[in-house]
Amino acid sequence: MARFLKDRSKKIGAAPGTPVFIGKQRLKETSIHLIDYTNKAISEKHFENETALEGLKDSGTVSWINVCGLHNEELITEIGGHFDLHNLLIEDVLNTGQRPTFTDYDDYFFIAVKMLKYDKVRDYVDSEQLTFVVGKNYILTFQEELGDVFDPIRNRLRKEGAKIRERGADYLCYVMLDTVIDHYIHIIERFGDKIEHLESQILGSDASSDTILKITDYKREMSYLRKVIRPAREACIHFSKSDSALIHKRTQPFLKDLEGLASLTAESVETYSDILSDQLNIYQTTVSNRLNDVMKVLTIFSVVFIPLTFIAGIYGTNFEYLPELQYHYAYPIFWGVMITVALGMLYYFKRKKWI
């Protein structure tokens, strides 16, 4: 399926708020992982239906409910019913082509971003939809498949006395978004190293026909990263500036830091995109200059041989009487004239700095 735009044909003609899954099914079954914690205790559960979620909305603990697999529209809708989620929000959760965004629904707020995955073999970036629903004491996360970048956060939560367990769901949401953005930066750095190495090849003598292909591939990846990261930055800015009662004052400084990190990430993508455009121009100029050098050499050879060809043509005619042919030293003189003309022209070109 295309990375830049998802197939939305299933939604054509559907009423707003209709729960329709848009995307590619990546898991056979939808699974739910619950981490329920306070500053003193923590529990974890795995289950495949929503019945275990009853009462979590109003519990005295902080609950992180992570749902993997979005193709089960009925289950996602039932989970939304347990937390009184708006139909439009459920629709956005099921749409894996959803643009990164932040939306405040008073009793909870919604954030959608992309979680990036880097394929080392193909030098390729793919993504999956990641959405957050954050309430007073719970956070719902929805992702397309198993595996994410949150294992360090889970380990922090499991550690007794960890400061993260003293904070609320809003802070947990910040930590998760911060991890996602950090992963963006890690991927950008991978491409950055290769782009900078490519520049040394272009300026050196290692440039080849594969160089233009690499530049094109990296420009495409930067375009995709820009499509993902630009709106993610906007979502982080809205999150930072939100006046939602669900966001504690002590979390605000962290959100300002998140906003700055997201802006830095977006600027890095723009910088490398500009570098690639410059590299493409440099490569094309270098190839053009090399071609000009070749043409200059060929032109000089042609110009040098024009008078030589003329002289040789005269003495190669079939006239019966050519006075010089009877002269004893005609042959060495002929060669002397030819060599003198050639050397004279080369000396002239050298004086003009054409060679």
Image (tube, rainbow, N blue to C red):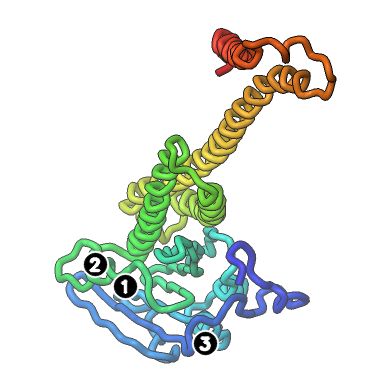
Q: Which mark is residue 75?
A: 3
Which tag, 3 or 2, sits closer to the chain's start? 3
At label 3, the amino acid type is Leu
Q: Is residue 249 visible?
A: yes
Query: Disc 1 to disc 2, how far (Cα)?
Result: 8 Å
Which quadrant does the C terminus fall into?
top right
**SS class of the residue under badge 1?**
strand
Residue at image location 25% in from the left, 82% down from the top: 43
Can you give x and y, in whole percent of width and height, for residue 87 in the image?
61, 75
Q: How many marks do you count on the picture?
A: 3
At label 2, the amino acid type is Arg
Q: Nearest the camera: 349 or 206?
A: 349
- Pointer 3 and pointer 1: residues touching (CB < 8 Å)? no
Q: Which mark lies nearer to you, 3 or 2?
A: 3
Instruction: Establish if 53 lies above or below 332.
Output: below
Can you give x and y, in whole percent of width and height, for residue 57 in the image?
40, 78
Which quadrant does the N terminus fall into?
bottom right
Side of 316 where 172 appears, left or right: left
**SS class of the residue under badge 2?**
helix
Q: Which mark is residue 118?
A: none
Which tag, 3 or 1, sits closer to the chain's start? 1
Residue at image location 61% in from the left, 62% down from the top: 4
Query: Disc 3 to disc 1, how far (Cα)?
Result: 22 Å
Looking at this rendering, what residue extends furthest in the right direction? 319
**SS class of the residue under badge 3?**
helix
At label 1, the amino acid type is Val
Question: Where does label 1 land, which residue?
Answer: 62
Side of 281 where 183 appears, left or right: left
Side of 293 where 262 appears, left or right: left
